[in-house]
Image: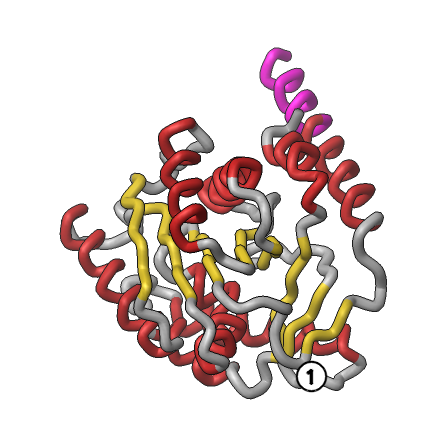
Amino acid sequence: MLKAFLKNLRDQRRNKTVSRYYDFVNAFSSLSPELVPALPAGGSVVLFSPHCDDESLGCGGILYKHRRAGHPVTVVFMTDGSKCQSSLSREKIIRLRKQEARQATEILGIDDLIFLDIPDRELADDEKTVRRVSDILAEKQPDIVYLPFYLDNHPDHKQTAAVGLEALKRQPGPDAYFYEIWSAMIHSHLVDIGDAVEKKREAIRVYQSQSDIETFAEQVIGLNRFRSLGSDNLFKFAEALFKLPPDHIDEILKQIHGR
């Protein structure tokens, strides 16, 4: 009986969160997203990647286009990859994941990387982590910040969004966008990546430590192809973004924490 009660409580909380999410995003998006043939307005970029590979899976096309346009791009990798399924030792898999990240981002033209080395699934929006991320924003002074979708179906993805949002409260100013990785989101913008999709595919395939990376690559590119529907087929491939309404950070944080 207790198990059933707890399950019902979790289901109610989940349904409430989903309902609040739809109410929230429907107020800031539409069936006709803003089409971005080039890039969102701005120059310098900081992207927060929960794991080594999420930057390429979620935003590889956009990041490549930023670098091709000459924009400074910093990628911050939040976790250390230590819980990757592998026969390698913890130290070796961490080292391999970083090596792959450097190789993948080099393909995308990026060499400014920051590794926070927080153990997988131990990421939290605690004071120490928020302060580290806030300091990065203060140093880099980006025009644009990219964060993973705040209800993405992975705890490290949600916590990356939470940390980034808390840091943005301390360092306001940049335009912030959510990007999708595992969970499709309602989007406000579609960015054309037709001329960058092969670079994205190449970068994803670097991550051979992930046993299904070839399948992942095709599935993600398939999502980008599907997203082109929202452009009335003006784009062949697109990456979806949701622009953060800056006055609603606290509301989004409540959704992340199920409050």
Judging depth in this view, the residue of 219 and 122 nearest the camera is 122
**Place of residue 122 in the rendered image (x, y in percent of width and height, measured from the top left):** 36, 34
Q: Is residue 158 visible?
A: no
The residue under the point 21% across, 60% down is 96
Quadrant in the picture for the N terminus:
top right
Q: Is residue 171 above or below residue 38?
A: above
Residue 174 point in image, percent of width and height: 57, 53
Chief secondary structure of the magenta span? helix
Magenta segment: does it hold 235? no
Q: From the image, tell me which residue sits under label 1.
A: 235
- In the picture provided, is 116 more to the left or to the right than 50? left
Quadrant in the picture for residue 191: bottom right
State whether residue 36 is above or below residue 98: below
Question: Coloured how?
Answer: secondary structure
Residue kind at label 1, given as amino acid type: Phe
For the magenta stretch, what is the residue range? 1-12
The secondary element bearing badge 1 is classed as: loop
Instruction: Tell me where residue 117 sits by quadrant.
Output: top left
Residue 153 in view here:
yes
4 relative position to 62: left or right: right
Query: Dot 1: within a 10 Å radius of its alpha carbon, few (fewer than 14), some, or many (20 or more) residues?
Result: many
* In the rendered image, the vertical position of residue 126 relative to residue 109, given as above or below: above
Residue at 26% x, 59% y is 97
